[in-house]
Image: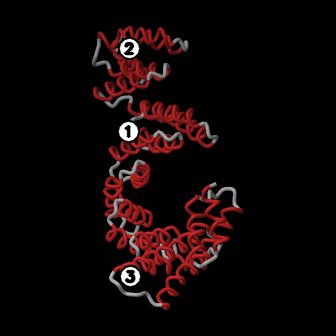
Amino acid sequence: MKKYLIGVITILVGVGLLFMACQTKEVTSAKVYIQQDNWDKAIEQLEMAVDMYPEDVEAHYLLGEGMAQKQNWERMNEEFEKSLSIAPTFEAQIKNTREKNWVNQFNSGVSKLNNNQVEEAIKSFTTATRIDPARVEAYKTLGIAYTKVEDLEKSKESFAKVLELEPDNKDAITGLANIHFQLEEYDKVIELEKNTLEMDPDDRDAIANLALAYDFLGEREKALETYLQALEKNPGDKDLMFNLARLHFLGNDYDKAISIFEQLLEASPDDFDVNLQVGNSYLGMADDYRQKLVEKEEQGEETTAEERDQLNGFYENAIPYLQKAVDIGEANPDIDVQSGVYNNLGVAYINVGDREKGELYFKKAEE
């Protein structure tokens, strides 16, 4: 029995010596330096090792670790990939090193972003993308950070990189669509949101964005159709209702515009923009009706008292809404009451015969 055990030990020692013999002296020296935490000397030895023995899987792996210590992330990845291409021996260690360093940089970026240190956050997220270029999270947050400093082109690049890695990433599609909106690239918005709706036909934000894009491109019928679809998914959505009413207003369909604006006022009677738009809608109706009366007179026909009363009625209807908008705006320092608002109110007062108030608001418009 003792002879058998001695034989087994002899075999094991022999195997150990065989493995020691397979390790180059450069790698052996590098490991000693690593134990001493002398990475500069270790890297010198490992550079020689990979140069002389390009198929040494461990030398490439250890050199990658050295590059991680020096934060040379591109070279780290290069050496790790060379090691993995030879054999998966150190796959778990490589994954752990990448994960540890990526998480440190990503979490640091999130913390800085939350503290409004946006420029520093961008540096951390950028470093995370260098450590592991295949992970999308850092590109997404990088896109958000760039929007905060209004670097829309860089933001667009970051979201586009996410979609390159994950074509169906809805967060990136939404982020990229928002950037294209700000850059007034509405064709791109339509393309992106159509992709979103192919994945999720009930996506409320995508439908709303699609409607807005059609609206801003002047494709009125498509915009109207899409706004109605969006409202089916988002009943009572104030922004969608406002934009739909505004679209009717721009198309001179004032009755429909006023009908929707009035619904919004039931919920928010002190909304500056909605009051203003109702008043402007009545002025639009007055302008259209006045033009008809002018054309009638040009043809030699006289306008009737009833017709003049009807014209006057449009101005009378406009005044309460325009006056309320002005009152709300003047009482709120965050609202900039434009000269056109005062001018429109002055026009309404003049046309109902209140010259004093009309001239008052014309003067405010000039000021």
Q: Are marks 2 and 1 in contact (CB under 8 Å)?
A: no
Q: CA distance from mark 2 to mark 3?
A: 109 Å
Residue corresponding to mark 2: 20
Q: CA distance from mark 2 to mark 1?
A: 36 Å
The three-letter amino acid code for the residue at tag 2 is: Met
Secondary structure beneath disc 1? loop
For the residues carrying marks 2 and 3, which lies nearer the camera in this image?
Answer: 3
Quadrant, the N terminus: top left
Residue corresponding to mark 1: 134
Residue 120, horizontal then vertical, whole percent: 57, 32
The three-letter amino acid code for the residue at tag 3 is: Glu
Name, please, the residue furthest toward the front.
300
The three-letter amino acid code for the residue at tag 1 is: Ala
In this rendered view, identify the residue nearer to me: 19 or 69: 69
Labels 2 and 1: the sequence-earlier one: 2
Label at residue 358: none
Residue 68, horizontal then vertical, whole percent: 47, 23
- Determine whether 292 is above or below 26 in the image: below
Labels 1 and 3: the sequence-earlier one: 1
x 46%, y 11%: residue: 42
Mark 1 Cα shell of 10 Å, populated few (<14), some (14-19), many (≥20): some
Label at residue 297: 3
Name, please, the residue furthest toward the right.
331
x 64%, y 60%: residue: 363
